[in-house]
Amino acid sequence: MRKFPFSVQILLGLVLGVTLGFLARANDLSWLASTLDTVGGLFVQLLKLAVPPLVFTAIVVSVVSLRGVANAARLALKTLLWFGVTALIAVGIGIGLGLLTDPGRGVTLDVGGAAPPKATGSWTDFLTGIVPTNPVGAFVEGNVLQIVFLALVVGAAALLVGDAAEPFVALNRSLLAIVQKALWWVIRLAPIGTLGLIGHAVASYGWDLLAPLAKFTTAVYVGCAIVLFVVYPLLLAVAGRLNPLRFFAGAWPAIELAFVSRSSVGTMPVTQRSVERLGVPRDYASFAVPFGATTKMDGCAAIYPALAAIFVAQVFGVDLGVGDYLLIAFVSVVGSAATAGLTGAIVMLTLTLSTLGLPLAGAGLLLAIDPILDMIRTATNVAGQAVVPTIVAAREGTLDRAAYNSAGRRDLIEPATPTPTPTPVPA
């Protein structure tokens, strides 16, 4: 397989997965569908296994690394500002598409059979859930939002302590390098994971379940495509004075891995490498990318909840006013950290629905097709996580434009470690 570029391997896994999925569904091969589910599930489980140590160590190291960045506070503020601006644009597109397409009009679904999802979100849950009652419990339960909070606090404390905290920071750097190395091995399995995930989705859903939700699914994909291929390139060209084609040449491996893995955090090492190859200084990239991987969610936290809220309101016959649409925008920009870089956006959706007073059971109507929607949502998330630091670095004059203009897709998936040349021993 090493003879083929990684992107070709992903494409082969995608095609083979779709083929096996249709074969399993057409011939009622339950054993094949179960095998595909197991293969895809193991891949996602391996990604999730790395999430707690990866998030904690990456954020601690990234916060401490701001010590060596000139105007670190201004850079952090500008990064947050661009996160908010792009999220606002994305949610505006989601609301606009929802009003234009009316995705819930004429949809016939068993509303009575829909149940609220097990994982729900509300503002009180979101705010109280940030601070863990037990630091160890946050890691055991894999609560990424609490891990982010702990990492930010510990990183800030280590930054202020200075040299005395260096052994602790060095330990986190070493652990981060080990976790990333192991994660590269998992990323290498992405073509096989793609085969299982896509195959199981096709075998389980086919076109029967998608038919009633075709308009909504299309709207989500179109909205994400507009942000991904129109909004981001315009921002790169206008705000950063950069060639968007060079950005996609450098960032595409991260975007395609995000599409198949459905995990912003799992894609983070590839995203950071892509951003650095695009010319963003490493010290700044090591802060912006990990932070964005847990809080910057234009697909999951902006486009999707806006369209889903409109869909649920129309299915349940609830009229939304201007104030409701403004509330959707506010929730999307402020509450995006609730998604926390994991697969799925159910918590963010239920947060939006509960804020608007819409039935939480409406989220249950969309659970079946969530994996299909999550692919394009996560790809959009990761693209935004790469766009923002690139624009900020360009506007700050720290972007290596020569590196940006020569960025390509080669060598972004970790190559084999070269064998060191032995030192000659004197006779």
Image (cartoon, rainbow, N blue to C red):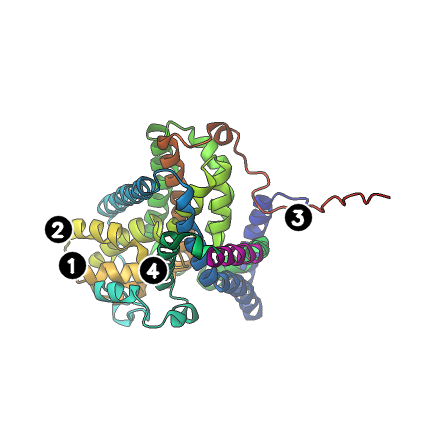
Q: Circles 2 and 1: CB distance less than 8 Å?
A: no
Residue indicated by mark 4:
149
> Between marks 4 and 1, how big is the CA–CA gap?
37 Å
> Between marks 3 and 2, how big is the CA–CA gap?
56 Å
Residue indicated by mark 1:
318
Say if residue 254 shows up in the picture: no
- For the magenta stretch, what is the residue range? 167-182
**Does 184 appear above or below 423?**
below
Q: Identify the disc placed on residue 417.
A: 3
Across and down, in percent, residue 393 comes to 39, 35
Q: Circles 4 and 1: CB distance less than 8 Å?
A: no
Q: Nearer the viewer, mark 4 or mark 1?
A: 4
Type of the residue with mark 1: Val
Type of the residue with mark 3: Thr
Q: Nearer the viewer, mark 4 or mark 2?
A: 4
Instruction: Characterize the local packing of mark 1: few (<14), some (14-19) or many (20 or more) Cα atoms within 10 angstroms.
Output: some
Q: Nearer the viewer, mark 2 or mark 1?
A: 2
Across and down, in percent, residue 187 comes to 55, 54
Type of the residue with mark 4: Phe
Which residue is nearer to you in this view: 74 or 370? 74
